[in-house]
Amino acid sequence: MNYNLTNKEDRKRFVRYANSLLKGEKELVSLEDKSNRTLSQNCYIHVLCRIMAQETGTTEYYAKQVYFKEIANPDLFVRVTKDPLTGQMVKTIRSSTELTVGEMSKAIDAFIRWAEEQGYTMPEATTNEDGTMTFNSSLDEIAFNQAEVETSKNEQYL
């Protein structure tokens, strides 16, 4: 079950359910944070994808779908399922809106590592507990801001 802990009634339901699990005879229960990726993470990955698109001569969409999702993060994004009508195996790509804050941090880190293996340097940031981003150095922040300006100039081509 999912609960929105910012909602007063959901919070009460969550506490009741957690207490019932504590009183029950269950040996093993699971609790996980389902918070979706944050707006700052979303902005960050879009700029990183624009940088990659500009560097490789592709579109931002292509950089995000292929480089970020399929190549750097197939474990998080690529799903192979059997089509119920044809019986063929089909590949689908998960949306980044479904990712938690932690999953998005993992995906961004993997993308930066992959890009560096290809010879591209990306500005690095860390996701804080509240989902905001902190750049690892002032040079990373300057590089990110400059990339944001430059890629916005070329947005029509990306």
Image (cartoon, rainbow, N blue to C red):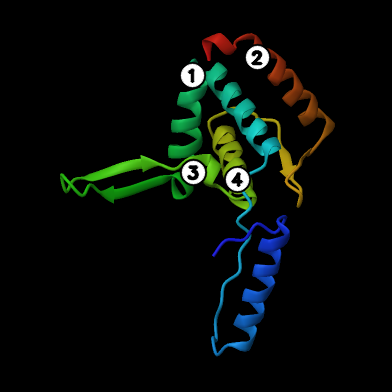
The image shows residue 136 at horizontal and vertical percentages of 78, 39
Q: Which mark is residue 104?
A: 4
Residue type at the position of mark 4: Met
Q: Which residue is mark 1?
A: 59
Residue named by callout 2: 152
**Tag 3–tag 4 contact (CB < 8 Å):** no
The span from disc 4 to disc 2 (Cα, nearest Å) is 23 Å
**Distance between the alpha carbons at the discs numbered 1 and 4:** 21 Å
Bin the neighbour count of mark 3 within 10 Å (Cα to Cα): few under 14, some 14-19, many 20 and up. Answer: some
Q: Earlier in the sequence, mark 3 or mark 4?
A: 3
Q: Nearer the viewer, residue 83 or 142?
A: 83
Q: Position of residue 22 (x, y in %)?
A: 64, 84
Residue at x 73% of width, y 43% of height? 126
Q: Sequence-wise, which precedes: disc 2 or disc 3?
A: 3
Q: Secondary structure at mark 1?
A: loop
- The amino acid sitting under disc 3 is Asn
Do the residues bearing badges 1 and 3 touch, measured as CB atoms within 8 Å? no
Per the rendering, the mark at residue 73 is: 3
Relative to 144, say whether 96 is above or below.
below
In front: 27, or 125?
Answer: 27
